[in-house]
C-alpha cells in the first residue's frame, strides 16, 4: 500500500494552455516555482466535489498577485480538460490547476494585463484505496520555522520552498510535520491545516502572518462544524496546547480529515469521538472522503 503522504507525483496527462504535452514530468519543477497560484483537487467519479471553493480561492489569490483570471473561464477550462481525458483514465484521482503570469516587461516588472498561462494536470489514484493508517497519522514538529509574510499569508502560491525544506527533515518515519512560525506559534503542517479539541471546543490556528488557508479548513469552519453545532475558535495557538489536547487532526482537500495518533517523541492519542463525528458528516456530504 502507498504510504499516506507518499503517492507518486508523476502526472499522467497534462495540458499547457490549450495543448497537451507528451512528457508532463519534464515541466513539473519548472511550473511549480514562480509567479502564480495553484489548487490541488480531489476527483471522484469525474466530479470535483469542492470545485467552487477551489475556483473562488484561486481567483481571489490570483488577483492579489496581479494575475487576471475569470472564474467562468477557469471552470470551462477544467470541464474541457476532464471531458477530453475521461475515456482514458480512472475517474478517481487528483487534478491540479496552476495559474501563472507570463507577462514579463523585463526584470521583475510584469504586464498586469497579460493573459496568464493555465496548466491542468491529472493523476489517477491507485486501484486500491489510499487511506490513512487505521489508527491515525504519525506526526513530528518541524525544525524549520515559517517566515512571517502577512501580504502572502493564506495564499497557495507556487513558491513552496518552506514546505520543501520542512518535509526534507525526515524520510518515512512520519506522515507529516507541524510547522511553527518565527514566534513559535503553530501555523499548519507541511500539507494541511490543524484542528484540535480544547476544553471549550475546537480550535484552529489563525492564518494571518503566514501559512495556507486551506479549502478543507474553510469547509469545516463554514459548513461542517456549524451543521453539527460544533464551535470553532480561530486564534493564535502554542504547541503545548496541542500536546495537552484530547484529540486533533490534520485536513486538506485531497485527504479530508486525518486524525493524529502520535507526536514524536512520546505523545499518543486514540481517534476521538468528536473527530469521528466530523469525518462521518464530511463523508455523508462528500463520499470521496469516506
Image (spheres, helix red, strand yellow):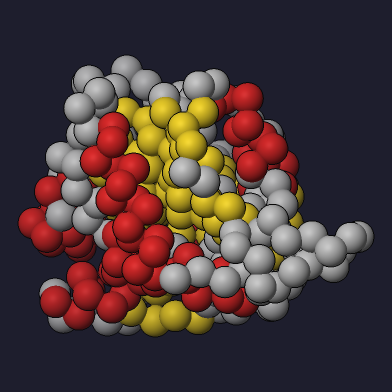
> Would you place residue 7 above or below residue 198 in this image?
above
Q: Can residue 36 be seen in this view?
A: no
Identify the image quadrant of residue 152. bottom right
**Residue appearing at x 19%, y 48% in the figure:** 47
- Residue 135: x and y in percent read 28, 36
**Residue appearing at x 26%, y 26% in the figure:** 89
- Residue 234: x and y in percent read 44, 80
- Residue 163: x and y in percent read 64, 47
Q: Would you say 6 lies left or right of 167 here?
A: left
Q: Nearer the viewer, residue 171 or 51?
A: 51
Q: Would you say 56 lies left or right of 284 here?
A: right
Q: Can residue 58 be seen in this view?
A: yes
- Residue 263: x and y in percent read 49, 45
Q: Would you say 120 lies left or right of 117 here?
A: left
Identify the image quadrant of residue 195. bottom left
The quadrant of the picture occupied by the C terminus is top left
Residue that sits furthest to the right in the current view: 107
**Residue appearing at x 66%, y 59% in the figure:** 101
Amino acid at each position: 500500500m502507498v504510504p499516506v503522504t507518499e503517492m507518486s507525483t508523476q502526472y499522467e496527462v497534462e495540458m499547457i494552455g490549450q495543448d497537451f504535452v507528451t512528457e508532463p514530468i519534464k515541466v513539473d519543477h519548472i511550473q511549480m516555482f514562480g509567479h502564480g497560484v495553484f489548487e490541488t483537487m480531489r476527483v471522484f467519479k469525474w466530479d470535483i466535489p469542492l470545485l467552487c471553493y477551489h475556483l473562488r480561492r484561486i481567483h481571489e489569490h490570483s488577483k492579489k498577485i496581479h494575475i487576471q483570471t475569470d472564474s467562468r473561464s477557469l471552470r470551462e477550462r477544467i470541464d474541457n480538460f476532464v471531458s477530453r481525458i475521461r475515456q482514458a483514465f480512472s475517474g478517481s484521482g487528483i487534478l491540479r490547476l496552476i495559474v501563472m503570469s507570463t507577462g514579463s516587461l523585463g526584470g521583475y516588472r510584469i504586464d498586469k494585463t497579460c493573459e496568464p498561462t493555465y496548466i491542468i494536470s491529472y493523476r489517477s489514484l491507485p486501484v486500491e484505496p489510499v487511506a490513512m493508517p487505521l489508527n491515525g497519522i504519525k506526526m513530528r514538529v518541524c525544525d524549520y520555522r515559517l517566515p512571517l509574510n502577512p501580504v502572502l499569508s493564506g495564499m497557495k502560491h507556487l513558491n513552496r520552498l518552506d514546505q520543501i525544506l520542512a518535509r526534507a527533515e525526515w524520510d518515512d518515519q512520519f506522515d507529516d510535520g507541524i510547522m511553527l512560525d518565527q514566534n513559535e506559534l503553530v501555523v499548519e503542517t507541511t500539507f494541511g491545516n490543524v484542528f484540535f479539541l480544547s476544553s471549550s471546543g475546537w480550535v484552529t490556528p489563525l492564518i494571518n502572518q503566514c501559512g495556507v488557508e486551506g479549502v478543507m479548513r474553510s469547509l469545516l469552519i463554514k459548513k461542517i462544524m456549524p451543521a453539527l453545532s460544533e464551535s470553532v475558535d480561530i486564534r493564535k495557538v502554542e504547541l503545548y496546547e496541542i500536546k495537552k489536547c484530547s484529540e486533533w487532526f490534520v485536513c486538506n482537500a485531497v485527504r479530508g480529515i486525518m486524525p493524529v495518533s502520535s507526536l514524536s517523541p512520546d505523545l499518543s492519542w486514540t481517534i476521538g469521538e468528536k473527530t469521528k463525528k466530523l469525518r462521518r458528516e464530511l463523508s455523508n456530504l462528500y463520499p470521496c472522503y469516506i
